[in-house]
Amino acid sequence: MEKKQEILKILSAKLRDIVSRLSIDFDELYEIRLRVNEPFIILLSGREYFVSERGSLEGKAEEGYIVKARDIRETLEYISSFSLYAYEDEIRQGFITVQGGHRIGLAGKVVVEQGNIKNVKHISFINIRMSHEKKGCGKKLLPYIFDEGNICHTLIISPPGCGKTTLLRDVVRLISDGNEEYRGMNVGVVDERSEIGASYMGIPQNDVGIRTDVLDCCPKAEGMLMLIRSMSPEVIAVDEIGKREDIDALAYVMNCGCRMIATVHGHSIEDIRNKPVLRKLVEEKLFKRFVVLDSGNIPGKIDKIFDERGTVMFSGITE
């Protein structure tokens, strides 16, 4: 099913009519923002537009269609197949993944019991994030993270929105599938926010490779240990580490002989070194490769690759 149809089937009747009139490339659509009593907004090709009732793209907020409470309510009914209660576990985490791997972010009144989030009620804000794959973007990285046929422990460092998940996903696919030069490996993915595999009913909607097993919506630290115990992975991949328990689990996985590929928010190795929880990763040389992404508008573009000593192995400037 093409992206346009995947989106139309989960929108309210009014929004469906508006979106069906849009004359756009849906492969370049990244976000649909719905907020009660606020203009209908989309993010297309890196630019924000207000969508009018007649389906035109406008630059002024007052020209955008004003989203009604019934639009939100009806859209939620379609997203959940009229059984919102069946998605309580996902809603507690703030999102639902739908067919096609698109992630629906939700916000409203949070219900807390004994310090834990129990539910989100009166949902008034929806952010539909379109699933995008960029196959092949990881090819350039492979020669730098393989050493004598084995994967080096690799940390991908990137500011938000620069494609670290996109790059990680493709690297997982390439390692899993293998090729004439590198044998395929069993890869375990802990997909805490359903962004790597974008699983729908347990099945990844993104291509993560033929030898990849995915734990969807699972906390990273617990998931890494579960994979070690149950799936015998040669490589484990996780996105956006940052908690102390993540670091402890990483060290355990490495001590078990399994290779790690992880991502983290940051701008440089020095940035990671200055964060108390993450400092250990650099100072104890747990990772053998550090990949720093470019902060430009090309998702997954590599700026520099360093080894554990801080020696530059690749620089995008020299390309």
Image (cartoon, grey):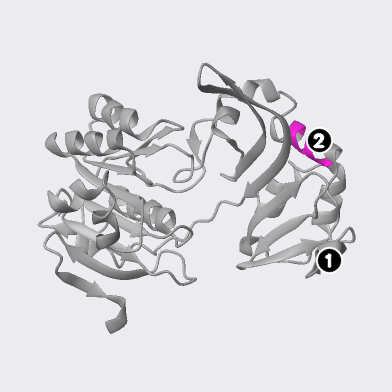
| Residue hosting label 1 | 56
User: Is-magenta flag for residue 49?
Assistant: no
The number of numbered discs placed on residues in the rendered structure image is: 2
The answer to whether residue 319 is visible is no
Residue at 69% in and 43% down: 126
Looking at the image, which residue sits at the far top?
A: 114
Tell me the tag on residue 131. none
Q: Amino acid at mark 1?
A: Ser
Give how far across and how far down residue 247 sits, in percent: 25, 39
Query: Does residue 138 appear to the left or right of 235 in the view shown?
Result: right
Q: Nearer the viewer, residue 86 or 116?
A: 116
Q: Which residues are magenta?
A: 71-77
Q: Please identify the quarter of the rendering in which residue 255 is found.
A: top left
Marked residue nearer the N-terminal end (1 or 2): 1
Residue at 84% in and 38% down: 69
Label 1: few (<14), some (14–19) or many (≥20) C-alpha neighbours in 10 Å: some
| Residue hosting label 2 | 74
Which secondary structure type mostly characterizes the magenta part of the structure?
Answer: helix
Q: Is residue 236 above or below residue 51?
A: above
The answer to whether residue 161 is visible is yes
Query: Does residue 52 appear to the left or right of 92 in the view shown?
Result: right
Residue at 23% in and 55% down: 273
Give how far across and how far down residue 78 sits, in percent: 75, 34
Q: Amino acid at mark 2?
A: Glu
Q: Nearer the viewer, residue 6 or 51?
A: 51
Q: Nearer the viewer, residue 120 or 145?
A: 120
Q: Secondary structure at mark 2?
A: helix
